[in-house]
């Protein structure tokens, strides 16, 4: 599982980058930049965040062992996608009343998942830090 989790996050990050870039190109072509917050979150958490997760799991492969990293990976994707859906609903104006609680739920999930990742990082780097 050690290299597999790193590879999983690398592969996911480039897919999120393509989605974020496609949204950016769509905004430029339509001259409607209303989805800029959605685009920014998709690029930051999807492209950059997932790539940073990959780098961590590659540098500390022992940290990828066990159930917690699998939970971290699953929640990272579910929370990011849910947050992007909520943000899209808000900034498209199509249904901000629905988008607000969706974005709030999944952004909070993403925040909570960072605490899980923090635990994984501290646990996985303990030997190197001493």
Image (tube, rainbow, N blue to C red):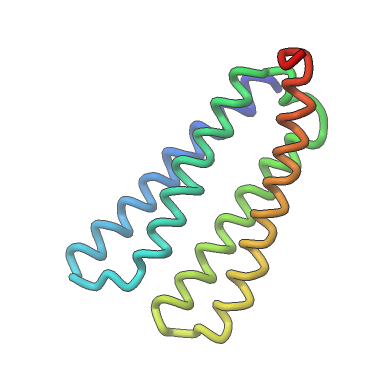
In the image, taking residue 45 as reference, residue 37 lies left or right, namely left
Q: Position of residue 129 (x, y in %)?
A: 72, 16
Residue drawn where x is 53% and y is 33% of the image? 52
Q: Position of residue 10 (x, y in %)?
A: 50, 31
Q: Quadrant of residue 28?
A: bottom left
Where's the C terminus, which quadrant? top right
22 and 83: which is toward the camera: 83
Between 77 and 62, the one lying in front of the other is: 62
Q: Is residue 40 left or right of residue 107?
A: left
Identify the residue at the far right of this view: 67
The residue shown at (56%, 86%) is 97
Identify the residue shown where x is 61% and y is 62%: 107
The image shows residue 95 at horizontal and vertical percentages of: 49, 85
Question: If the image is split into quadrants, where does the N terminus sit?
Answer: top right
Give the answer, above or below, for where 30 lies relative to 64: below
Residue farthest to the front, as pictured: 130
Front position in the image: 113 or 128? 128
């Amino acid at each position: 599982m050690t290299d597999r989790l790193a590879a999983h996050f690398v592969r996911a990050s480039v897919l999120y980058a393509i989605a974020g870039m496609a949204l950016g190109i769509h905004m430029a072509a339509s001259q409607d930049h209303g989805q800029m917050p959605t685009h920014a979150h998709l690029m930051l958490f999807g492209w950059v965040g997932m790539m940073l997760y990959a780098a961590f799991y590659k540098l500390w492969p022992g940290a990828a062992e066990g159930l917690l990293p699998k939970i971290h990976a699953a929640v990272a994707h579910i929370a990011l996608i849910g947050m992007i859906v909520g943000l899209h609903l808000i900034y498209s104006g199509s249904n901000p009343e629905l988008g607000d609680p969706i974005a709030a739920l999944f952004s909070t999930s993403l925040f909570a998942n960072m605490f899980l990742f923090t635990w994984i990082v501290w646990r996985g780097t303990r030997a190197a830090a001493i």
